[in-house]
Image (cartoon, helix red, strand yellow):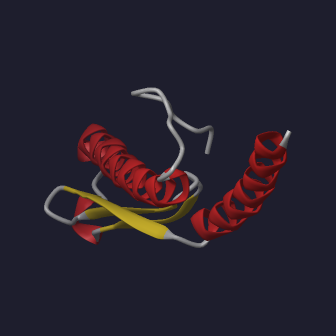
Amino acid sequence: MRDMMGMMKEMAGLKAKMETMQNELETTFVEGRSGGGMVTVTLNAKGGMKGLSIDPSLMNADEKEILEDLIVAAHADARAKIEGVVAEKTQGLMGGLPLPPGFKLPF
């Protein structure tokens, strides 16, 4: 029975840590870039877009498709960086828990 109580305490502590981490993810920002920095997308670590910067030289109607591709690429770059940030924060949070390989938390 003692083990069950200890586990319940651990779970309560883990829940509080997860809530703190969720708040941190909301205020942690990453930038994705493409086109040599001509397009920059800023996302919070939960994936919310907070900014988009486009070099004025790309504002050409004839190059619309190129600009669209650069925006998508910058967004993909930022998303990849988010995965690293979330993995790092999750590892610190879940360090002592045995999770199956490839298990991802729903953040």
- Residue 85: x percent and y percent? 41, 59
Give above or below for 25 relative to 75. below
- Residue at image position (13%, 62%) is 36
Q: Residue, x 41% and y 65% (percent of image)?
A: 30
Image coords of residue 13 (percent x, y): 75, 60
Q: Residue at x 35, y 49 (%)?
A: 71
The C terminus lies in quadrant: top right
In this rendering, would 83 be left or right of 69? right
Residue nearest the observer in this picture, 72 or 27: 27
Q: Residue furthest toward the front?
A: 1
Q: Report the number of discs.
A: 0
Which is nearer the eye, 85 or 64? 85
Question: For the point 58% across and 38% down, which residue is it?
Answer: 105
Task: Please tell me whether residue 80 is drawn above or below residue 101 in the rendered image.
Answer: below
**Which of the image's four quarters has the N terminus?**
top right
**Front in this rendered view, residue 20 or 72:** 20
Image location (x, y in percent) of residue 5: 84, 47
Residue 101 image-quadrant placement: top left
Whole-percent x and y of residue 89?
A: 48, 60
* Image-based side of 11 in relation to 101, left or right: right
Nearer to the camera, 102 or 98: 98
